[in-house]
Image (cartoon, rainbow, N blue to C red):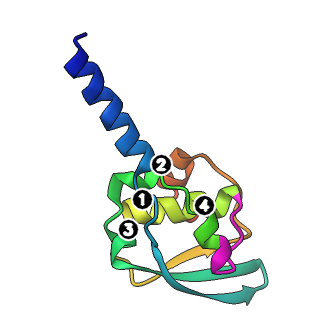
Amino acid sequence: MGAVATALLISLAMTGAMAGAGTDIIDHATVTATKNGNVWHVTPTPEGRELGSSAWSYDPTGEMELHGIPATDTMVNQLRCHALFVPDKTEWQLEEARPTRTMSGEMSSGCNP
């Protein structure tokens, strides 16, 4: 592999790793207590709706905590799934009581397993 091709691959890898860095994807969130636990109703920012495939590598934990949303594995995966597959929903519902699943598990269950 030539130097130019290597540099291009490194650049692409860094771009993917940094996708979403410094981007706010949560406009606001409210919480509803249910008999099964809390449900966070997240309204994404326009940038959150446009995150697309960058959601795979985006780390939302700091922003979730800033909005009072527990950044557990299940909540992070639900948020990423919504950003990837249903970005145009009015709000993204993140359900605290849902089991932790892989991203493929989240996808197969429609983001809320």
Q: Quadrant of the N terminus?
A: top left
| Quadrant of the rendering where the C terminus is positioned | bottom right
Above or below residue 29? Residue 6 is above
Specify the segment rendered in magenta: 65-72
Q: How crowded is mark 1: few (under 14 residues within 10 Å), some or many (20 or more)?
A: many
Residue 54 placement (x, y as % from top left): 38, 53
Q: Earlier in the sequence, mark 4 or mark 2?
A: 2
Residue at 39% across, 84% down: 90
| Residue 7 coordinates in the image, percent (x, y) | 28, 25
The residue under label 4 is: 76
Q: In this view, does 85 lie to the left or right of 102?
A: left
Mark in front: 1 vs 2: 1
Mark 3 packing: few (<14 Cα in 10 Å), some, or many (20+)?
some
Q: Which one is in front in this view, the residue at disc 2 or the one at disc 3? A: 2
Mark nearer the N terminus (1 vs 2): 1
Disc 3 vs disc 4: which is toward the camera?
4
Q: Distance between the residues labelled 1 and 2?
A: 8 Å
Can you tell which mark lies on residue 20? 1
Front residue (pair 54, 39):
54
